Image (cartoon, helix red, strand yellow):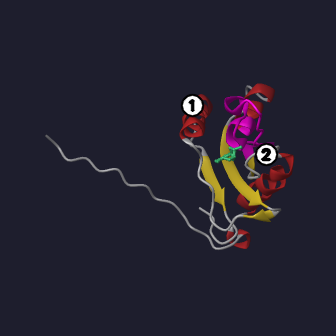
Amino acid sequence: MTNKEIKIAYKEYDSLDQLEQYDRELAEAAIQATEGSYAPYSKFNVGAAVMFTDGEIVSGANQENAAYPSGLCAERTALFYASASRPNKKMAALAIAACQNGELIQSPVTPCGACRQVMAQYQTKSGIPMQILLIGKKKIL
Ligand code: THU
């Protein structure tokens, strides 16, 4: 038997101003993408933005449906659109933001298991690490 350990290193910021320019641009795109959210049931407006290695950004937002499982999270909306519209590009980063009553939420939202599975596979497809930015008003991870 051998003992194994998994360590995860990540950065925490207090505000968008502290981010590098590329990260800030992507974070702002995710915040803007919340405007495309269709969430009449949860009223939780999530936006996600993908940056490719060439700096181009595409985004998506959560889409809800009366037939509950037919809706889709912002992350998968953005990732599926990114892959479907630019199949040969590499995804370098994904930012996620959420608003309630028109205000960015205080603590960052974290992706669900299904979205994490999809993120993992697009990271493999791209062949490079996918940086993840979780945007909250008071905390950015
Ligand atoms: N949602 C996302 O789009 N991404 C997340 O990371 C968390 C949850 C959506 C799904 C649903 O439309 C609403 O937020 C409430 O869960």
Q: Which label sits in the foreground, 1 or 2?
A: 2
Marks 1 & 2, CB-CB < 8 Å contact = no
The residue lying at 53 percent from left, 39 percent from top is 113
Q: Which mark is residue 39?
A: 2
Regarding mark 2 in the picture, which secondary structure is present there?
loop
Quadrant of the snapshot with the N terminus: top left
Looking at the rendered structure, the kind of residue marked 1 is Gln
Counting from the top left corner in percent of width and height, residue 34 is at: 80, 52
Q: Residue at x 76, y 60 (%)?
A: 100
* Label 1 Cα neighbours within 10 Å, binned few <14 / some 14-19 / many ≥20: few
The answer to whether the beta carbon of the residue marked 2 is less than 8 Å from any atom of ligand 1 is yes
User: Residue 14 appears at what percent x and percent y?
Assistant: 64, 74
Q: Which residue is mark 1?
A: 121
For the point 25% across and 47% down, the residue is 4
Element under label 1? Answer: helix
Q: Is residue 82 magenta?
A: no
Q: From where the camera sits, is residue 22 visible?
A: no
Q: Earlier in the sequence, mark 1 or mark 2?
A: 2
Determine whether 33 is above or below 71 in the image.
below
Against 121, residue 96 (above or below) is: below
Span highlighted in magenta in the image: 49-78
The picture quadrant where one finds residue 134 is bottom right
| Among the 4 quarters of the image, the one containing residue 83 | top right
